[in-house]
Image (tube, coloured by chain):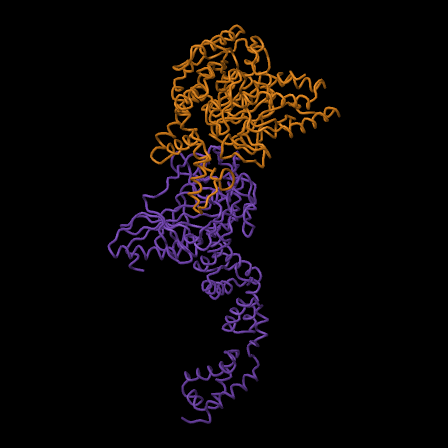
Chain colours: A orange, B purple
Amino acid sequence: MSYCVELSAYEIIKKIKAQELKVVDYISYLFERIKRIEREIHAYITLTEDSALKKAQDIDKKIERGERTGRLCGVGIAIKDNICTKGIRTTCASRMLENFIPPYNATVVNLIEDEDGIIIGKTNMDEFAMGSSTEHSYFGPTHNPWDLERVPGGSSGGSAAAVISSMATLALGSDTGGSIRCPASFCSAVGLKPTYGLVSRFGLIAYANSLEQIGPITKDVRDCALLLSCIADHDPLDSTSVNKPKEDYTNYLVDDIKNIKLGIIKELFGEGTQDSVEKGVWDAIKKLEQLGADYQEISLKNLDYSLPSYYIIAMSEASSNLARYDGLRYGYRIPNKSYDWNAVYLKNRRFGFGFEVKRRIILGTFALSAGYYDEYYLKAQKIRTLIRRDFETAFKRFDVLIGPTMPVLPFRIGEKVNDPLEMYMCDIDGVPANLAGIPSISIPCSFSNGLPIGLQIMAPPFREDLLIRIGFSFQKNFPILKKLGGHE
Amino acid sequence: MSKIKSLEIKIGLEVHCQLTNLKTKLFCSCSSDYRGKEPNTLICPICMGMPGTLPVLNEKALEDAIMVALALNSKISERMLFFRKNYFYPDMPKNFQISQYDKAGGVPFALGGYIQINGKKVRIRRIQLEEDPGKLSYDGTIESSNHTLVDYNRAGIALIEIVTEPDMETPKEARLFLEKLRSILEHLNVSDGSLEGSMRCDANISLKGGKRVEVKNISSFKEVERALNFEITRQKNLVLRGMVIGQETRHWDETRRITVSLRMKEEEQDYRYFPEPDLVPIIIPRERIKEIEQKMPELPDERRKRFIEQYNLSPQSAEILTRSKAMADFFEESVKIYGNPKEISNWMIGELSSYLNEKSIEIDELTLTSKQLVDLIKLIDEGVISRKMAKSVLQDMLLTGKMAGDIVKEKGLEKILDKEYIGSIVEKILKENPQAVKDAIFDKKAMNYLMGQLMKKTEGKIDPKMASEVLRKRLSELAKFITP
């Protein structure tokens, strides 16, 4: 039965509910697999085997007694390490929080536990979610399961790698400027960034508050709909969480996209887009057309400015968010003889933060400084408004908008890490959805030279249903048969 | 004073008032009752700014702020926006303060308005809602201490910041402004100004030709007059010596009673304000403001007018009695028990106020109750003690906390009213002062000496009216036997 770890959550839950599979056995197989391949992939920062097995036993007992179980019914979930877990260290892949154990759960973690999901570990990421390759982790990089020489994407690289190598059945990531969709694309997983405000951010360690959302990274769209249904709920602890009734997104797993209008965003196929990616995405569009959808190209002019706008806003917010890490109340603290708090702060921050984090703090601080604020931060916000309007206008004509998730195929570890601008350029297709606050999904659409390509679909605010319907129809009619191998 | 005036002093204040009547902090559910509590016990992950936590606005704080804005005649903004004020300091768990801002697309909670002091309008520039930082303690002074202790119990307490235009011209006016503001806040039942540190302010002072100097860390309105007087004298001396006053920020050292330079203009901090992304803009519906407006309690100015009409007080008396809520409440309670508002007002404005001024305390810091004051006034009205005697009884009451009746009894202060007894004392005095008797018979004015002797003999307890009657009668009898 150890093959069961390769199944989707939907299939595993079915087996568990039919009492064909014990939760304890399944969780044990997961950890066996982790022990076998984690060394090569390094998807995790922290594993929680003991508590996971204990929880598994509890759920098995519930099932034996015939008690009601939650919708996740014993499924093993990997949580990105910037989402707070009570009693489990939450590091943000930073030396600064290497030993930080939160005394509280993120709201999404509570919701998952309420539905009997089992947390099996905390996944690797770029430090404080700043990066697109998971190379900027204090704990070392994660490797792409399809090619260990390559990056899994970022910043939720650990979550995507864990799910796709079957070291977790479901995973949570966070997406500030593509951080769920990029690794989903690079690892051939499904990754959804929900509408801003749909999922509570309480307990998500902030990088750029106004842009980010927690979302699912899964093997297929069905699992994505299931996990989203569990985590999307109004939260009074998050003022930006929208107060709307809970939805069951699995209702939208419908194989029918006839007459759906697809807008293909020209700007997302711009300079720097690899031919293989362009071809892969267009093939997928043609497949959607075969299923009855109509498509047309559209230009969103202001997207040309989305990358600078995104980086200014994200870095500005980050410079303020990360000010709290001074080592005084928690976090990294160098033994220091000085009683001068300023000197102590300086030292703790100098050694507690990695290079990329410091770069973004400095740039963000600069962008907010007197005399530059109007030129940078305010201008970036104006562009953001224009981009939002571009989308609003486009959604009057189209149901969804489409482009590649990433302009490039997964690159080699070390290839871009010393060239921040080239690395930032990789985010060019991901950031518009964050700036506009709209939902966006990445669905595996094909492979080129053995490397995955992701199709990005964006919908109007709170129209996750459309993304799930289109994604489900695509996967149902054009399944990708390529299986991961080489690590068994 | 006249010399100072000629320098055209302009004073503006930036007052921080805690909304002390809130049960919880501004953005979390921690108790706001932090005074006297063990350090760092009223904290939670949210007010400690721990990773991943988010602020949620206290709805009651917004209601309090609306009341304050209405009472100060300010215009409440339609949208409430919070901004982050970024700077590193150990009293702030997040190293930024959630505040509001009037530039960079920000809107303060309310704009404009005024407070009337002695018929003069002091204009309000803006009103903001923000969080209080924690509290730092030093071993000795900020300069000599080699370590700093931090107590975060205060971190996150709701503060209202009120910024005035530079409309005040004397330290006295600044004090009156703060007194009036405090009275308003207390009448609104949003803040108790008697709590330590509940009302703090920074003052901006400029003399004609000089730049604006900001004095920070003024902890109460008693201190404001002192700090301003010092600062004005300091600046005046610079001007007289032909020196230029540059823009700077100074710190009021309460113990040494001087201002110390913190930083010059060039070193002014850049707070890198930007909109707080974790708090969505709040629309304040006009209906909500109207609703609150309708249940606004009586304010000091209305109360003053009512005192004049209802109790027939002079405008001056009414003004003094409504300067603080405690004073006005004390007055009305006393009147409720006994009536006689004139008499009560006289005692409160006279004896009681001078005692409070002398001790530099507030009326609610006294053990004296309105009932006790009424009892004292009753003793006068019933003729048990003289008015003069009552004044010394009041002093005793204030010092010892005893009841008026007990003091009178203990010290045997009852007025001498027995006509026969008064007669015998008069006889005694006449015998002891034969020359004075002669003088008094021919010169009515010389009778005062004998009256004085009577008072002295009885330690003032003799009823002056009866005594002078008896004395006059005896003198006219004696006049028959004496020839000039």
- Residue ID at (71%, 25%): A60
Q: Quadrant of the N terminus of chain A?
A: top right
Q: Is residue B98 above or below residue B349?
A: above
Q: Nearer the viewer, residue A253 or B189?
A: A253
What is the tally of numbered marks visible in this picture?
0
- Tell me where residue A247 sits by quadrant: top right
- Which residue is situated farthest in the left direction here? B242
Which of B186/A217 is in front? A217
In this rendering, the answer to whether B342 lies above or below A52 is below
Left or right: residue B276 compared with residue B8? right
> How far across and how far down the image is residue B34, in percent?
54, 49
Res B468 seen here: no
Q: Quadrant of the C terminus of chain A?
A: top right
User: Height in image: A473 above or below A160?
Assistant: above
Picture coordinates of residue B86 (x, y %)? Answer: 42, 39
Query: In this view of the protein, which residue sits in the foreground, B141 or B106?
Result: B141
Single out the residue that lies furthest toward the top: A290
List x then y, in percent, for residue B39: 54, 49
Relative to A22, is B134 above or below? below
Residue A303: x percent and y percent?
Answer: 40, 19
Residue B416 seen in the current view = yes
A222 on left or right of B158: right
Residue B413 occupies which quadrant of the picture? bottom right
